[in-house]
């Protein structure tokens, strides 16, 4: 008898999107070694960690080298000092959490998939289209049925519940990757009501909440009723440049119960079995994000990205091109000029301007005619890229 593989892996598509983008850019560079390439496709940040965070990381490293301050295994769900800091952050935005509702993670991506350990294979999973591919692939790997909520120009890429769809688990990402669109309170309330009515559970991915300003909701728990139907997944990646440092957190409310089981208790059991906690040093760095100096430094970086986003949206406004995002998000999701398909537009843009973005088709069928630009480049390159963009497509 040989080991049998999980045959569901036969059903996941090759992750070809960024590989294909990179391949096409490489070929272009080989053919045009003198041409400048400006990368506006990546979702990775470029600004370094805040000085306050680096200071905390160094101090924690020193602690680990001394007998008196050395830390071995920590609590699987995270140290209280970081959970207190996260709780304080929510409190400032009007949300009360208990400490044991917060679970520190090594980033949002892991928990996006791991949470499904708690739920039967028979659940039907609803994801928007276009979508962050992790939600789809983790569920296809497990063999769950996936249904889609169409996000398109008509609904400004913010689909609302469709009573004819029977969804058990619902992934919502707001502000959204890839579309940058952000739900209002009323729109989120419609999802919360739908989930509570049906007994569904919402996985709310708040990885981009840090870009929200004004009265828009940052957390689903700002919506009445969310604590009985939603888990929230969040990250320090975009908020504080932790993409390479790795830290996040997941909130599982005590009031979330299904089939007579407290989801919080199940998640704790799952984490204590399969996860040994986020590194002490990293958690100290993450806690520094919430100090006044840390917050000011991180906010300055976010302002820089917001400024880049404005350079992009100002150009698109001037050209009368439809887009979503760019306001509460580092992503700008634009309609390809000239009604082109996204891969054609990718090649045309690269050829004519040297600018690299991400074809919308890579995120789902509704992305076929759309394109994602990100605000994570430098100001200089963003301005240069959008000037070229205007020169080439402004007259189309
Ligand atoms: N969720 C969304 C929507 C993302 O776009 C990303 C990263 O780009 C993540 C989660 C992953 O975050 P982390 O770096 O914390 O794993």
Image: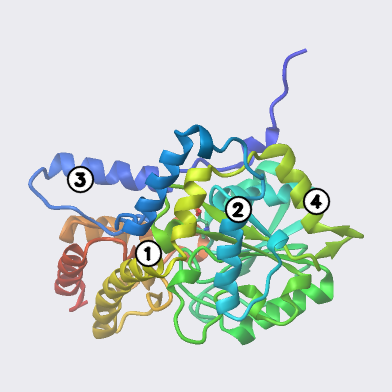
- Compared across the picture, whether 282 is left or right of 337 comes to right
Q: Residue furthest front?
A: 68
Given residues 5 and 392, the one toward you in this image is 5
Q: Look at the numbered discs 3 and 1 and tell me whether their residues touch, using CB distance below 8 Å.
A: no
Which numbered disc flags the more N-terminal residue, 1 or 4? 4
x, y percent for residue 357:
31, 59
Answer yes or no: disc 1 within 8 Å of ligand 1: no
Which numbered disc flags the more N-terminal residue, 2 or 1? 2
Q: Which residue is mark 4?
A: 266
Q: Which residue is mark 3?
A: 28
Q: Kindly identify the residue that appears in the image at 34 percent across and 48 percent down.
A: 21
Pair 2/1: label in front: 2
**SS for callout 2:** strand
At label 3, counting other C-alpha atoms closer than 10 Å, the crowd grade (few under 14, some 14-19, many 20 or more) is some
Q: CA distance from mark 2 to mark 1?
A: 30 Å
Q: CA distance from mark 1 to mark 4?
A: 37 Å
**SS for callout 4:** helix
Render colour scheme: rainbow
Q: Kindly identify the residue that appears in the image at 51 percent across and 63 percent down.
A: 207
**SS for callout 3:** helix
Answer yes or no: disc 3 within 8 Å of ligand 1: no
Given residues 139 and 206, the one toward you in this image is 206
Q: Quadrant of the N terminus?
A: top right
Q: CA distance from mark 3 to mark 2?
A: 42 Å
x, y percent for residue 191:
69, 76
Res. 104 mark: 2
Q: Kindly identify the residue that appears in the image at 31 percent across and 62 percent down.
A: 376
**SS for callout 1:** strand
Q: Is residue 360 visible?
A: no
Q: Which residue is mark 1?
A: 372
Q: Quadrant of residue 333?
A: bottom left
């Amino acid at each position: 008898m040989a080991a049998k593989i999980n045959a569901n892996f036969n059903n996941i598509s090759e992750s070809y999107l960024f590989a294909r983008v990179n391949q096409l850019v490489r070929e272009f560079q080989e053919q045009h070694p003198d041409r400048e390439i400006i990368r506006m496709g990546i979702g990775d940040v470029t600004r370094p960690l805040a000085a306050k965070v680096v200071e905390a990381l160094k101090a924690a490293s020193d602690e680990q080298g001394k007998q008196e301050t050395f830390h071995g295994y920590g609590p699987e769900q995270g140290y209280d000092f970081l959970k207190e800091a996260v709780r304080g952050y929510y409190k400032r935005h009007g949300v009360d959490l208990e400490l044991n509702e917060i679970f520190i993670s090594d980033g949002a991506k892991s928990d996006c998939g791991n949470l499904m350990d708690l739920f039967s294979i028979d659940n039907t999973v609803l994801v928007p289209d276009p979508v962050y591919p992790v939600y789809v692939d983790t569920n296809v790997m497990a063999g769950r049925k996936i249904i889609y909520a169409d996000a398109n120009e008509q609904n400004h890429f913010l689909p609302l519940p469709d009573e004819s769809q029977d969804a058990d688990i619902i992934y919502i990402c707001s502000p959204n990757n890839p579309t940058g669109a952000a739900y209002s309170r009323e729109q989120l309330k419609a999802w919360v009501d739908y989930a509570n009515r049906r007994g569904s559970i919402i996985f709310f991915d708040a990885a981009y909440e840090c870009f929200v300003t004004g009265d828009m909701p940052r957390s689903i728990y700002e919506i009445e009723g969310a604590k009985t139907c939603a888990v929230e997944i969040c990250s320090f990646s975009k908020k504080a440049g932790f993409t390479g440092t790795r830290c996040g957190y997941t909130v599982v409310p005590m009031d979330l119960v299904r089939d007579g089981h407290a989801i919080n208790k199940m998640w704790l059991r799952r984490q204590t079995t399969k996860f040994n906690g986020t590194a002490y040093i990293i958690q100290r760095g993450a806690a520094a994000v919430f100090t006044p100096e840390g917050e000011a430094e991180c906010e300055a970086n976010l302002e820089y990205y917001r400024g880049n986003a404005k350079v992009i949206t100002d150009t698109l406004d001037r050209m009368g091109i439809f887009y979503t995002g760019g306001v509460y998000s580092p992503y700008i999701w634009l309609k390809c000029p000239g009604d082109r398909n996204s891969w054609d537009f990718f090649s045309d843009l690269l050829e004519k301007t040297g600018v690299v973005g991400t074809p919308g088709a890579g995120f789902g069928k509704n992305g076929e005619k759309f394109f994602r630009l990100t605000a994570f480049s430098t100001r200089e390159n963003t301005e240069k890229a959008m000037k070229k963009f205007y020169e080439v497509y402004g007259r189309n």
